[in-house]
Image: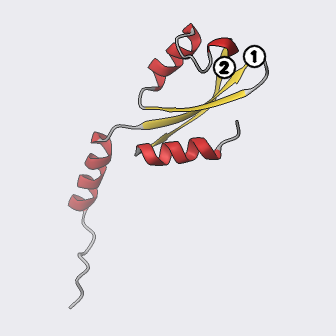
Amino acid sequence: MNPVRPYSIKSRSSKIADISNKSWYYTYVLWSEKNAQFYTGTTSNLRQRLKEHTQGLAVSTKHKRPLRLIYFEACLNKGDAYRRERYLPR
């Protein structure tokens, strides 16, 4: 007897619900117009983090303003987001 369960719509919808209840983690790339350099970062609240960067509240980019968001992507877990941040160019 095959132990693999047949595919059903019910199991698929529960998987979709599991994904929608999880929080997202974002990896982003900023471009400094002041010194023409990239800055990469990871956060769980992209809007708030961008606000901190643009207002000069983030120590890491305070001296690099003005900044422009040029890329971001969403990950389902923090580890993937941090691995992706290390992979992207700096």
Residue 54 lies, with reference to residue 12, above or below; the image says: above
Amino acid marked by disc 1 = Glu
Q: Is residue 52 above or below residue 74?
A: above
Task: Tell whether label 1 touches label 2 (CB within 8 Å).
Answer: yes
- Quadrant position of residue 33: top right
The disc placed on residue 71 is: none
Dot 1: what SS?
Answer: loop
32 lies left or right of 25:
right
Q: What mark, if any, has residue 68 been given in the picture?
A: 2
Would you identify the image quadrant in which residue 9 lies? bottom left
Q: Quadrant of the C terminus?
A: top right
| Dot 2 alpha-carbon crowd within 10 angstroms: few under 14, some 14 to 19, many 20 or more | some
Using residue 10 as the reference point, say whether residue 87 is left or right of it: right
Q: Which mark is residue 33?
A: 1
Residue 48 in picture, x, y percent from top left? 45, 18
The answer to which image quadrant residue 31 occupies is: top right
Residue ID at (57%, 9%): 56
